[in-house]
Amino acid sequence: MFRVSLLPQAAPFVIAGALLTAPAMAQMSSAQNDAPDSPAATERRAKPALERENFDRPTADAQREADEQLQADERQGLDQFEKQQGKDSREGVDEQQRVGDRQATDVRESLERALRDWSNEEPHADRSVQRSEIVAYYKKRDYAPIWRDADGFTDSANSAMDTLRDAGRDGLRVNAPAQESSWSAAGELALSEAVADYAAQASGSRVDPAAISDDIEERPKVAKPAQALDAVAEAGEAAGERLAAFNPPHPAYAALREKLAELRAARGHPRQEATAAHGSDARPITNFASLSDAKAKRVEAEIIANMERWRWEPRDMGATRLEINIPQYEVAFTRDNELVQRERAVVGKKTSPTPVFSDVMPYIIINPTWTVPESIIEKELEPKTGGKLSKLRARGYKVTYRNGKPIVQQEPGEKNALGRLKFVFPNDLLIYMHDTPQKKLFSRAKRAYSHGCVRVQNPFKLAEEVIGRPGYDEKRLKALIGKKEHRINLAKPIPVHVVYFTAVVNDEGALKLYDDIYGYSAKVRSALAL
């Protein structure tokens, strides 16, 4: 019933049998080997031998295959490692991106809330308009901040802050926000408002020229908030310089700014001697420390008022230009930014002031005809003739009528009110510059005698410089004097600026004050609360 293995018991007998039969097997094998080999037998013996040789000694191809397999395994492992690393890296970048996006969203939302609250406040009317434009500016940017970076406020913000804190240097009054180490929505808006305010003030927003006088035609181009923020926000360390550039670029303005700084520095020193701030044709002020406190304060206000009026002038007045400064009673011609000639001038009376404006001069006329303005006919000629203008014919005037209105003209000649030469800059104001038969008026210190036009001393000498072409020297021009009009076109129209400055830094670097003959400067000081 039990199955018992016989292999252990049979093993000794099997081994003994093998040993006894081995000689016989060997003899039989030897006998067979002694017999001739057949081809088939030879092949059978060779094949196992080749197989044993191949098995015992691997080939070069097998070794190469093994090496390649090892390299492939290594590459596969490295690829898997790199993929895992890349996956981890992408996950880290994605996480950082998500964090950054969340922060940017939070910043935009906080700025949007701050702008909403900001616009709901009730500032001054002018400030309200400015704020609404700033709100629109940020809304267009999807409420992205312009002054923020990873470290707080940008380099642009810090540079702009330096200029804002120094606004008084240009006579401006700007509320510079407090310096903050970390960014906030409130700090962002305070800085944007201050930058917009500075640019507006610097470009002429504080005083409306039309409110000073109807005879002031200049209109400053006041910078808009978007213009200011675009110019400054991305300027980096140059942001403060960009902001300051909204002030007038004229050398005369810069000279007044330097005098303002000198005066303020001198006010901290004791007076050396009492000296008044003199008016027209008087001694320049060379020692600010010598002024009394009251006089120094008045001079400071006058400088700032004049700096303000420079903001009304065109930013580019032309490298070659003609300037007529009314309070100075002077005409100055500049070519390629170098002063060429100065001449005395007679300007309009207080009752008929010379307008402040800019235009261009395309030509001059020798032997001009004077067509009397309607205002002079009505206010002077008709009262003097008792309404009988025909009496003027005896005095060399030509009187005609058109549509019932009188036209009075004075033919060219020695007694012509325009003299022998007229500088024409066509304008609706009917203002031009000309010669005059009343030469004696140029010897007077105060020369406000005209009906509004400007009379100039030595007109032919000035015309030579203005024309600036060979064959048109003073002698040649005077040779054209006669009864026939001669029009001479300029090679290029020249800008003409009729200005009103009562504080001027002269060629020697001293400040000189002139009479406020029309009262414009007093009105500007009042508007600025100086």
Image (spheres, rainbow, N blue to C red):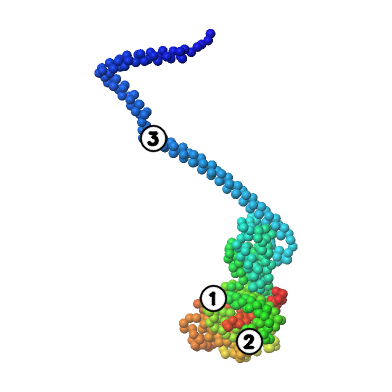
Residue 518 visible somewhere in the drawing: no
As drawn, the label of residue 283 is: 2
Q: Tell me, yes or no, if residue 286 can be seen here.
A: yes
Residue type at mark 1 is Ala
Query: Mark 3 or mark 1: which comes first in sequence?
Result: 3
Residue depicted at 70% across the width and 77% down the height: 525
Instruction: Report the amino acid beneath label 3.
Output: Gln
Report the label total.
Answer: 3
Q: What label does residue 63 carry, if any?
A: 3
Q: 478 or 65: which is nearer to us?
A: 65
Q: In x, y percent, where is residue 205? A: 66, 70
Residue type at tag 2: Arg
Compare marks 1 and 2 and give the one earlier in the sequence.
Answer: 2
From this viewpoint, which residue is outermost toward the top? 1
At a point 50% along the width and 86% down the height, the residue shown is 474
Q: Position of residue 130 (x, y in %)?
A: 68, 64
Q: Nearer the viewer, mark 3 or mark 1?
A: 3
Q: CA distance from mark 1 to mark 2?
A: 30 Å
Distance of label 3 from label 1 (alpha carbons)? 89 Å
Above or below 28: residue 416:
below
Which residue is rendered at x = 65% and y = 62% of the image?
A: 192
